Image (tube, helix red, strand yellow):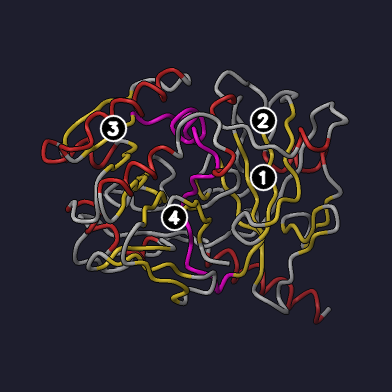
Amino acid sequence: MRKSFIGLILIIILLCTSCDYSQDNASLDTPVNIPSPTTESQQIVPDNQLSNNKEEDNKTPVISRANSSDIQVIVTQDFGNELIINKKTALTGSESAIDVLRRLTELETAYGGGFVVGINGVKSEYPSEKKDWFFYINGMLSNRGGGSYTLNPGDVQRWDLRSWSSVGQVSATIADFPEPFLHGYAGNISPTTIIYADNFKTEAQMLQTQMLASGINNVSLIEYQYLSQEDKENNNLIIVGTVDLPLISELHSNYKRLGLTAYFEQNILTVLDSSGNKAREYKEDAGIIQATQNPWNPRGVGACQNVVWIISGIDNDDVISAINLLSGDNIELDNAFGMIIVDGKPIKIPWQ
C-alpha cells in the first residue's frame, strides 16, 4: 500500500512539472515557456516497414520523405547519438503515438500504462536516476503526451532517452528536416519565412527553391530588416547570417532559456556538452545549424506552433558551409539535434 501511495505521489509530481513555466527575458519580445516532460510524453516508439534490410531501415530519409504518408518512428539515446529504431508504418485509422508504440514494440509501462518504462529492453532509469524519454513530433518537443497526440499522415515521431539534468529542454531539433516545415504539428502547418542578411540572398533563394521542390508550401524570403512583427511571431523562421546579425545575437544571448547547445559570443563559438558545461570553443572556421521553438510566439516556447532555425557562422564562408548541409539527402543530419561545422567538418551537438 505504501509503495502504491509513493507511486501516486511521483505521478502527481511529474504531471505538475509538465506545466509550462515562464522565465524573465530582457531581450526576447515574449516570455519563454518551456515544457518539462509529462508522464505520457516520457515514452518511446519503434516502427514497422515490411523490410528485411536492417541497413535500409536504419537510414533516416531527409528530403525524400516529402511525398510519404507513412508514419516514421525513430528512437534514440543521448540527443540522437545512439540509434535504436528507425522504421516506417502506415496508419490503421485514428491512432495516437502510444497506439503505434504498442503495436510495434515490446512496451513496458508503469502506473496503469500511463508511464513508459522501456522499449525493446531499453529502459528509463527514473527515479534512481533522472533519465527519461523525451517525445518529439516533426522536430518539436511535444506539449502533449504520447497517448493524447493523434498522428497525422507523414508525421515523424522521435523518442530520445536522456538525462533531465542535460542542457535544459531542447525544444526543437534539426534531425527530421524537412520537418516541421512540411507537416507541422497536429496537422497545423505554419508558413515559413527565410530571413537573410543582404549578402546571403543567393543562398537563401537556393534554400527556398529546395524547400518548395520538396513539397513545402508557403516559403517566403525577406531581408532581415523588413521582417514584420506578425511574421516574426506566427511563422516558422530560418535565419541566415553571420553572428553579428541582430536576430541571431538576440537568440544566442538567451541560449540557456532556449535550450541551445551552442552559441556565439564576441565571435567565439562555445559548444556545450550534454550536462550544460562548456566543452569546446572556436574562434574561426565555425558554422552552426540549430533550432528552437519560436520564442517570439505570444504563447512562448512549447506552443508547438512554429520554430526558429539558426544558420550562422563566424564569417561568410562558415555560413555557406552550414547552409550547404541542408542540400539534398545529407546523411550528416541524421539524428542530429544540432550541428556545428568546424574546418568544413560537421559535428553533432551537444558535444559528446
Q: Quadrant of the C terminus?
A: bottom right
Q: Which residue is mark 1?
A: 147
In this orientation, does residue 256 appear? no
Identify residue for label 2. Answer: 71
Residue under label 3, please give it.
Answer: 193
The amino acid type of the residue labelled 4 equals Ile
What's the distance in space between the residues labelled 2 and 1, CA to CA?
16 Å
Report, in whole angstroms, how far the alpha carbon at label 4 lies from the one at label 1. Answer: 34 Å
Depth check, mark 2 against mark 1: the one in front is 2
Q: Secondary structure at mark 1?
A: loop
Considering the image in quadrants, where does the N terminus appear? bottom right
**Which of these two is toward me, 18 or 290?**
290
Residues in magenta, as a range: 164-191
Which residue occupies the foreground of this view, 236 or 55?
A: 55
Question: Mark 1 vs mark 3: which is more N-terminal?
Answer: 1
Q: Is residue 292 above or below residue 276?
A: above
The numbered dot on residue 340 is 4
> Which of the 4 image quarters holds residue 51?
top right
Residue type (three-letter) at the residue carrying disc 2: Ile
